[in-house]
Amino acid sequence: MIRRKKIYTEAPRSISKAISEGEIIADFLPPPDKLVRKEPKVKITITLNSGSIDFFKKYARKNNVKYQTMINEVLDKYVQKYTGRAIG
């Protein structure tokens, strides 16, 4: 199969022009120390509805994360909403 050459109609003709006229975007990523959660975790045993667990497991697989992490994030957001303080 022969691939056709893609033509980008909106691309600048000159790299130097693109660099000089390009828009600078402020760094929006948090620093590494803000990525590490400082809140200690506590292991618990909890009984949840199977439909809820199935939901979290499905989306955890899709996003390549642990379903427990997703549930923890939901709980943290709930606490933050009703207490006004960030968790983690």
Image: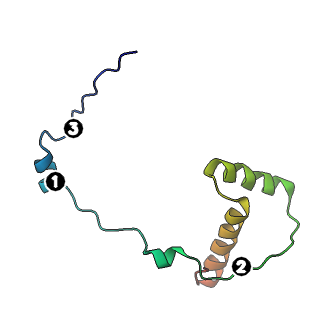
For residue 15, above or below residue 65 = above
Given residues 83 and 22, the one toward you in this image is 22
Q: Which residue is mark 2?
A: 41
For residue 46, above or below residue 16 = below
First reached walking from the N terminus: tag 3 or tag 1? 3
Q: Residue at x 83, y 75 (%)?
A: 44
Q: Which residue is mark 1?
A: 19
How far from the left and from the top, in percent, is residue 16? 11, 49
Answer with left or right where residue 27 lies relative to residue 70: left
Q: Hey, which quadrant is residue 84 in on the image? A: bottom right
Residue type, numbered disc 1: Ile
Residue type, numbered disc 3: Glu
Check the picture and name the quadrant holding the C terminus. Answer: bottom right
Q: Which residue is mark 3?
A: 10
Q: Hey, which quadrant is residue 9 in on the image? A: top left
- The residue mark sitting in front, 3 or 1, is 1
Task: Give the CA separation, mark 3 to mark 1.
Answer: 15 Å
Q: Hey, which quadrant is residue 11 in on the image? A: top left
At numbered mark 1, what does the secondary structure look like: helix, strand or loop? helix
